[in-house]
Image (spheres, rainbow, N blue to C red):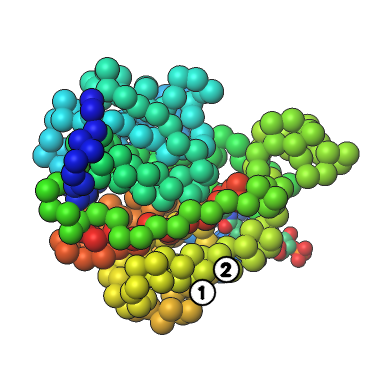
Amino acid sequence: MTPNQSRQYGVEIIGSGNGLPSRRLTNADLVKMMDTSEEWIIQRTGIEERRLCDWDSGEKTSVLAAQALQTAIDDAGITPADIDLIVVATMTPDMPTPTVSCLVASKIGCDGVPAFDFNAACSGFVFSISTVHELLKGGMFKTVALIGADCLTQYIDYSTAGRTASILFGDAASAIILRRTDDTSKGLIAHAMHTDGAGSSILLIPGSRSDHPDPENCEDREVKRVYMNGPMVFKFAVKKFPEVIQETLDLAGLEADDVDHYICHQANARILEAARKRFGLHEDKLRININKYGNTVAASCPLVFNELCKDGSIKPGQRVMFIAFGAGLTWGASLWQL
Ligand code: ACO
């Protein structure tokens, strides 16, 4: 394909859909597995339950991602043959290679179509939606499938020793279909993307003892398990979340109230409430659905987007801002005119 350098296009989001695992893990279930309480989890995080892959029945990242994409294709009223690029934002591929996107392409019947994965942890969907926009805007592609898919619970220690991180995460996939359009008023208005590798040691999955922030005291059970310094991540998030919202509003020359929906990474209800208060936003402008799914990493923002589309809250012509932060450290926002 040759990009048409002579013109620029608008970009519209024409469909969305989820792929959710069958198993539910409630706070009551967690109480049976470790020293915790339903009250503690609700009060500190806002989470009531999360979905978990049933690994024995074959649920995994590529399977959920393909389900999400098929649902989004149906929602958009297109066929797999219309898609000319598949991008999967994930930090939990089924295996190091092939990519999740290649497996999804095959499952959906899109063999031969370019496909690649994009890893920016919980910021993966937000970083990739801005990137994909530019590929569409320049004319390189016409219809792109973008999927946020993560099954992080495979790296979780469900014992009391891992209780700070284990209560937070759930598995999920959620997809959107983006299409270029001649209406140049639609698409990305402004974006921000940031990383800070110096902060990597507060949130990681050590591949070996030497990756662990305290290698001398790292136990075998901690290798290939989520390590999170909860209070440090919390501090980072409550600072960067409003900062990146303000940065993106400033780039667009808009006020907080000019945006109809803030579609935020669901990491902790308290972090989201703090951002809502900071900008004086009405509840309708910042949806919180962490109670149902927990933190689903790159699937988190599109899960919120799909929910808002399905219940009719999102309407054509509105402005929406996707915002996320995560391991890396990474943080970013992507502001769209629908
Ligand atoms: N149940 C009961 N008690 C617990 C649990 C639990 N599951 N986990 C920790 N505690 C205890 C601790 O042991 C500690 O006890 P102590 O006071 O006797 O020492 C006490 O609760 C307070 O522990 P903190 O870690 O300070 O708890 P905090 O209030 O910070 O809440 C939490 C922990 C919910 C993890 C919070 O820090 C948080 O949400 N951090 C941000 C996490 C986040 O956003 N992660 C996602 C990043 S995105 C990505 O890219 C993966």
Q: Residue 280's spot in the image, x, y percent?
A: 41, 82
Which residue is painted at 20% across and 35% down in the image?
Answer: 4
Q: Residue 200's spot in the image, x, y percent?
A: 67, 47
Which residue is painted at 30% across and 46% down in the image?
Answer: 133
What amino acid type is highlighted by mark number 1?
Ala
Q: Quadrant of ligand 1?
A: bottom right
- Number of numbered discs visible in the structure rendering: 2
Q: Is residue 89 visible?
A: yes
Q: Earlier in the sequence, mark 2 or mark 1?
A: 2
Q: Residue 119's spot in the image, x, y percent?
A: 50, 38
> Mark 1 Cα within 10 Å, few/some/many (few <14, many 20+)?
some
- Residue at the extreme bottom: 280
- Image quarter of residue 145: top left
Which residue is painted at 40% across and 29% down in the image?
Answer: 116
What amino acid type is highlighted by mark number 2?
Val
- Residue at the extreme front: 6
- Image quarter of residue 260: bottom left
Q: Is residue 17 visible?
A: no
Whether pointer 2 and pointer 1 mark residues with C-beta atoms closer than 8 Å, the reply is yes
Quick one: quadrant of the N terminus? top left
Q: Which residue is mark 1?
A: 274
- Say above or below: 250 vs 290: below
Q: CA distance from mark 2 to mark 1?
A: 7 Å
- Say above or below: 47 vs 144: below
SS type, badge 1: helix
**Disc sitting over residue 238 in the figure:** 2
Question: As drawn, is 11 to the left or to the right of 279?
Answer: left
- Residue at the extreme right: 216
- Say above or below: 279 vs 178: below
